[in-house]
Image (cartoon, coloured by chain):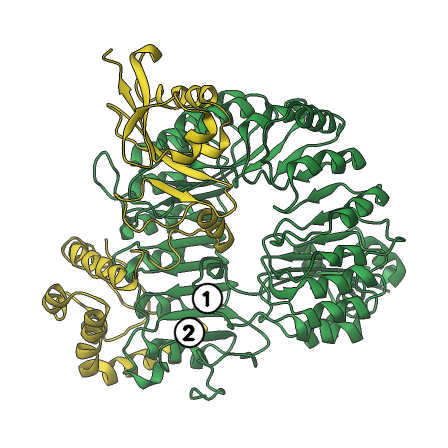
Amino acid sequence: MELQLGLALPTPNMLKGFDLNNHGLDQLKEMGGLEAWNKAAGCFADKDCVKSKRSFEQAFGNFTEECRTKPLLLWSGQPNEEEDHKDQKKATFSTTDENDAEEDDQVVGWPPIKTWRKKIFQQQQQPRVGRAENNRVAENENGRSIYVKVKMEGVAITRKIDIKVYHSYQSLTNSLITMFTKDKKCNEDDYILTYQDKEGDWLIAGDIPWQNFVTSVQRMEIVKNWG
Amino acid sequence: MQKEMAYSFPDEVLKHVFSFIQSDKDRNAVSLVCKSWYEIERWCRRKVFIGNCYAVSPRMVIRRFPEVRSIELKGKPHFADFNLVPDGWGGYVLQWIAEMAGAYPWLGEIRLKRMVVTDESLELIAKSFKNFKVLVLFSCEGFSTDGLAAIAASCKNLRELDLRESEVDDLSGHWLAQFPETCTSLVSLNISCLGSDEVSFSALERLVDRCPNLRSLQLNRAVTLDKIANILRRAPQLVDFGTGNYAAELQPDVFSNLAGAFSSCKELKSLSGFWDVVPAYLPALYSICPRLTSLNLSYATIQSPDLIKLVSHCPRLQRLLVLDYVEDSGLEELASSCKDLQELRVFPSDPFGVEPNVSLTEQGLVAVSLGCPKLQSVLYFCRRMSNAALVTIAQNCPNLTRFRLCIIEPKTPDYLTLDPLDAGFGAIVEHCKDLRRLSLSGLLTDHVFEYIGTYGKKLEMLSVAFAGDSDLGLHHVLSGCESLRKLEIRDCPFGDKALLANAAKLETMRSLWMSSCAVSFGACKLLGQKMPKLNVEVIDETEPPDSRPESYPVDKLYIYKSVAGPRFDMPPFVWSMDEAVKILH
């Protein structure tokens, strides 16, 4: 699609100044990262800098009167080139993200969640250092929440529940049944709830008093009852 | 002899007529009719709303409107909520308060959003305005409980004290005790943001006791569940209530006490709070659920089954805020139970996890769009989306006015076809003709902006991240969206061309934010020089922008219209592109 707009500008200069296709892309592909983006923008812009500046000033001399009815630039959109350089631009921006992201692999301000909400999450779940190691995901200082991973045989999603919310095995299993039967239609009796204790042993849930269970459970798994 | 209509009524009559005109737009129109109407109107305008505190100076406001009783000010750009605006950027309210203290002795209402409010400002408010009634500090910071103590002690007729989402330096809970025994006028009190465990609960109880008009009360997390019943019994007239901590060992007498207290509140329509909720205590709410129109469970880490049970008791629900623990199944239940639903917000429980921890997908939102015909406002965090789903949602909900979708991983394509989500969002803007606010996410090319420019004629606010291919995208938006007031963009390949080609458009908008894009320092300077009605500010915390070539992209750019000229309180990392201001600090 071509965009035909008003006043004249020496188009070739303009486009040369900003057309990554011809100049910086190969360099960008090799280098990657924000520095490369800046360098590329800098290197070919230097050549054309003075020319471009004059072009803008020429345009702006006329534009205040014309602005509402006639936008300024003579510009043809570059839909054909979009496809080509889209991938490269994507690559640039994702490497930018990786450079921005520090210890947490996070981009600043993304996802867009207000700071105080993030604090609530952090109070409820400590950030995971190693995903595989930390099954007992977070324990709050005041003992307000204890998050434990629960996996069910045959179900892809591993859920995390707050053990502190329950006061008995019955309430725990009721909740787990309701949660997991959405993912996998099954008969309750075919499954048993097992857990891993502090020593790393896998045991069947229900043998020890509830309070002891709460302090020793590391993670849980719902497995088929072969017995 | 011909008399102009304007002179055929005495001023007092016109003043009386104007007093029925409340909206700012209408008032502004009235003031343009003729000079005498302008004069009469400006003397009787009582309420002023300033969407950007730097767009105008306090002196200018006071000069034009000498008898204001209520003022609302907004400071930092919206992206400050997500840590994109460095500390110390600005938005200080002190100068406003100082000037209004002299000019508006009868000022009764101050509402601030995203501003820096110091204890000094609060003390000045307490000292200066004898008839002070309403203080709303929405997402503000910079003050402590000492400042609140000054307000409590001095404002004899305080009706509203609302600190929602503000950051308060919590030095002591005793400020609550500063409300004199003679203060009985409170209608609304929101202290949900206060962190300390030292809220003086007995002072709070006594305050609630002596304020018979208290309609809205939001407690903070420090208030434990066993105390809720006491408060509710003292305030059965409450319409809007925010619990504190909703956790305790399940005890039958505590439960029945709580249930009884809730059932005595016949007017209760809106609930929030529910920190650390224990699901076993949720049934205590069942007696009031049939009347509930608004429910904020967004701090509650309860799972889908308990959420489903609760929501199924609330057929009149119009507004629901919830974590993604609700899952698709919970949203399906919502869709079948709550036909009056107008607003839905689903927040992520594990935003930084790489893998999904809950079964919440686009299906949940589709279900709600199908079951809730009155749906107008959506904020939805999820991990996958498809064009087909968005098209369905658009067709089911043509009355959407606010649609904010956040697919957590940037640039995620349609999970079914791997296409960009252009067509889906295009359908949203095409079908939802009254759409005023839109936030985009996922993989998006310039095409989505073409749709937005073509169809988004009523769009006032647009948020864009990790989207687009070229300046054409930005050009579509700036040239097509006639009602656009606020545009915020981050991490998009938009450069100088579209911005300069549409420079005049910026004068019709409140503000433009661009960060991690490709706008060059040279272009910013040019805009600053050529557009005197705009303040063009470059933010860079690492080094001055003129220490690099002019073609280098700036880190962050904030452009807003202003009649006050460049501001005087810029920190070292903010550079004004105004010709009159020295670039080097």
Q: Is residue B102 above or below residue B109?
A: below
Q: Foreground residue, B554 or B551? A: B554
Please give left or right for residue A35 compared with residue B452 in the image. left
| Residue name at image x 64 percent, y 66 percent | B143
Chain in yellow (letter): A
Residue A32: quadrant of the picture:
bottom left
Alpha-carbon span between mark 1 and mark 2 = 9 Å
The circle on residue B539 is: 2
Q: Which residue is at 70% across, 56% downward?
A: B173
Residue type at the position of mark 2? Ile
- Comparing B523 with A56, the one in front is B523
- Residue occupying the point 16% across, 53% down: A83
Residue B358 in the image, given as x and y percentages of width and height: 36, 34
Q: Secondary structure at mark 2?
A: strand
Amino acid under disc 1: Val
State which tag comes first along the sequence, 1 or 2.
1
Looking at the image, residue B210 lies above or below residue B301: below
| Label 2, residues with CA under 10 Å away: few <14, some 14-19, many ≥20 | many
Q: Which residue is mark 1?
A: B85
Q: Does the rendering let one see residue B542?
A: yes
Q: Colour of chain B?
A: green
Is the Cβ of the residue at disc 1 closer than 8 Å to that at disc 2? yes
Report the number of numbered marks. 2
Q: Report the chain holding disc 1.
A: B
Is residue A68 something that shows in the picture? no
Image coordinates for residue B109, horizontal then vertical, percent: 75, 59
Please report the residue visible at 63 percent of the width from the left and 36 percent of the height from the top.
B271
